Amino acid sequence: MQTTIRIMLADDHEIVRTGIKQMLESEQDLQIVAEAANGREAVELALEHQPDVLIMDISMPQMTGIEATQALTQANSPVRVLILSMFDREEYVLNAVKYGAYGYILKDTDKPRFLKAIHKIANGEKYYSSEVSQIIIDQYLHGVTTPEASSPSTQTDTYNRASTYDITKREHEILERIVNGHSNKTISDELQISVRTIETHRLHIMKKLNVNNAADLIRIAIKQQIV
């Protein structure tokens, strides 16, 4: 008898959740039992519904996917987290692994690999996309510590690079948080300034870096080592 794998989705974009849901529900052995639109809700619903696999984005309001994964691990939850992200940045990957994620794949992963990841994780195995696996392998081979916060000297270096783009100290603080997957609301709470002000700063940063969307903003910030 085929066992049904109970799945929960956590992504702040409804259209993304809908697309994943439609794809997975076409599989006879997969069942969507809950959906969350932010990290805090993801933790609450995961503890309530106890899905076999929680497919979770990193960049979400209230709590990032990594913070939510950490919270579930600290609660000794048996829920196995599969991070599904558009980012393969080293610190995201290593911190996801550190805080208990069973898998990490990218959003451009094809359906067969996506399904393979779900089944392996539901079976208690780990699964990482090839790009992510290389980061993990490099970490173990070279003894790289899990990056969580830049050292003061590193922060100074990155800010100096930011200044070459005429990015102010406040804009740099906001850009760092954008790259780390924080929402405007989270940044607003952390810096004690309004969401509208955050949005204004974001537009100024995008203009200075000559980009038109958040994905390009993050890509350029990382590529130019501004953060």
Image: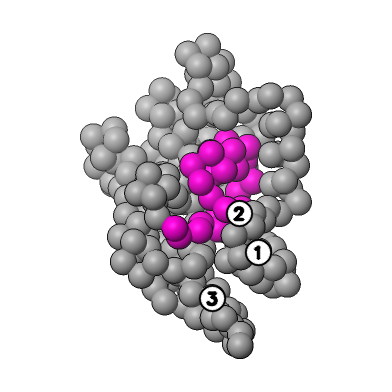
In the rendered structure, which segment of residues is drawn in magenta? 78-105
- Residue 162 on image: x %, y %: 54, 24
Position of residue 219 relative to residue 54, above or below, is: above
* Whether label 3 touches label 1, CB < 8 Å: no
Q: Is residue 75 left or right of residue 66?
A: left
Q: Which residue is mark 1?
A: 120
Q: Identify the residue shown where x is 53% and y is 39%.
A: 98
**Counting residues from the N terminus, which is met first, the one under dot 1 or under dot 2?**
2
Please identify the quarter of the rendering in which residue 134 is found: top right
Q: Which residue matches tag 3?
A: 5
Which numbered dot is residue 166? none
Q: What element does badge 3 sit on?
A: strand
Residue on which disc 2 sits: 103
Amino acid type indicated by mark 3:
Ile
Q: Quick one: label 2 or label 3, which is nearer the N terminus?
A: 3
The alpha-carbon separation of the residues under discs 1 and 2 comes to 9 Å
Q: Nearer the viewer, residue 178 or 104?
A: 104
Amino acid carrying label 2: it is Gly
| Whole-percent x, y for residue 93 in the image | 60, 42
Q: CA distance from mark 3 to mark 1?
A: 11 Å
Magenta residue check for 163: no
